[in-house]
């Protein structure tokens, strides 16, 4: 099952890439939303091999997964791969410079069930696909607006 969204951002590609790779900010955001996030690598700066153990509640059950940064192509994008005992997946963020001060961000998440119970979970998600897709696109759009709001202050 895939979710994808595209947004044009009024900020240079390097600024957008720096914000997308600000993993500490994403860790804090997940903690505020009730997830438990534990960094399990010892890299000093963002790079391939960064990894996290994440625990969160979804549909009434606690879920555990491991996330790893598997591809980092500055300033063009990144790939995060996730895996758990029941589900795998990845998130791809692609950045394209439309002009000196404008960037197009494409964000795609794909979920891959591993066993029968995760297939049932994905099937139930498919029933609510349009609602989930709308919520995902809204979240990506909010992130893009937030980047635009932050850019003038950092310039």
Image (cartoon, rainbow, N blue to C red):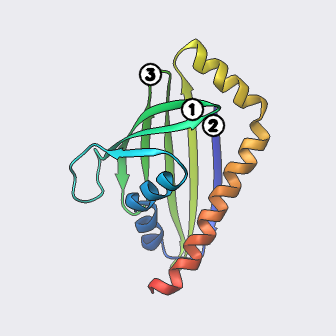
Front of the two marks 3 and 1: 3
Q: Secondary structure at mark 2?
A: strand
Where's residue 70, x and y in %?
35, 42
Q: Quadrant of the C terminus?
A: bottom left
Instruction: Measure how far apart labels 2 and 3 are at the Cα level.
Output: 20 Å
Cα–Cα span, label 3 and label 1: 13 Å
* Label 1 or label 2, whichever comes before in sequence order: 2
> At 49% across and 45% down in the image, what residue appears?
35
Q: Are marks 2 and 3 in contact (CB under 8 Å)?
A: no
Callout 1 secondary element: strand
Of callouts 3 and 1, which one flags the residue occurring earlier in the amino acid sequence?
3
The crowding category of the residue bearing disc 2, from other C-alpha atoms within 10 Å (few below 14, some 14 to 19, many at least 20), is: some
Q: Residues within 10 Å of mark 3 (few under 14, many from 20)?
A: few
Q: Which residue is mark 3?
A: 85
Farthest residue, direction top? 116
**Cα–Cα span, label 1 and label 2:** 6 Å
Q: Quadrant of the N terminus?
A: top right
In primary-sequence order, the first of circles 2 and 3 is: 2
Callout 1: 10 Å neighbours few (<14), some, many (20+)?
A: some
Residue 2's tag is 2
Task: Please say if 17 is above or below 84.
Answer: below
- Residue drawn at 53 percent across, 48 percent down: 34
**Nearer the viewer's eye, disc 2 or disc 3?**
3
């Amino acid at each position: 099952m895939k979710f994808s969204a595209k947004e044009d951002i009024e900020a240079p590609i390097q600024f957008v890439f720096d914000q997308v790779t600000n993993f500490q900010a994403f860790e804090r955001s997940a903690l505020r939303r009730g997830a438990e996030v534990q960094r399990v690598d010892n890299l000093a700066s963002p790079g391939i091999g960064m990894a996290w153990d994440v625990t969160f509640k979804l549909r009434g059950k606690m879920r555990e997964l491991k996330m790893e940064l598997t591809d980092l192509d500055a300033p063009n994008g990144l790939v995060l791969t996730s895996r758990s005992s029941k589900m795998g997946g990845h998130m791809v963020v692609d950045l394209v410079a439309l002009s000196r001060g404008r960037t197009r961000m494409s964000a795609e998440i794909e979920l891959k069930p591993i066993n029968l119970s995760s297939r049932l979970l994905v099937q139930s998600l498919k029933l609510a696909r349009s609602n989930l897709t709308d919520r995902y696109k809204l979240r990506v759009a909010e992130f893009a607006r937030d980047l635009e709001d932050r850019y003038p202050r950092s310039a």
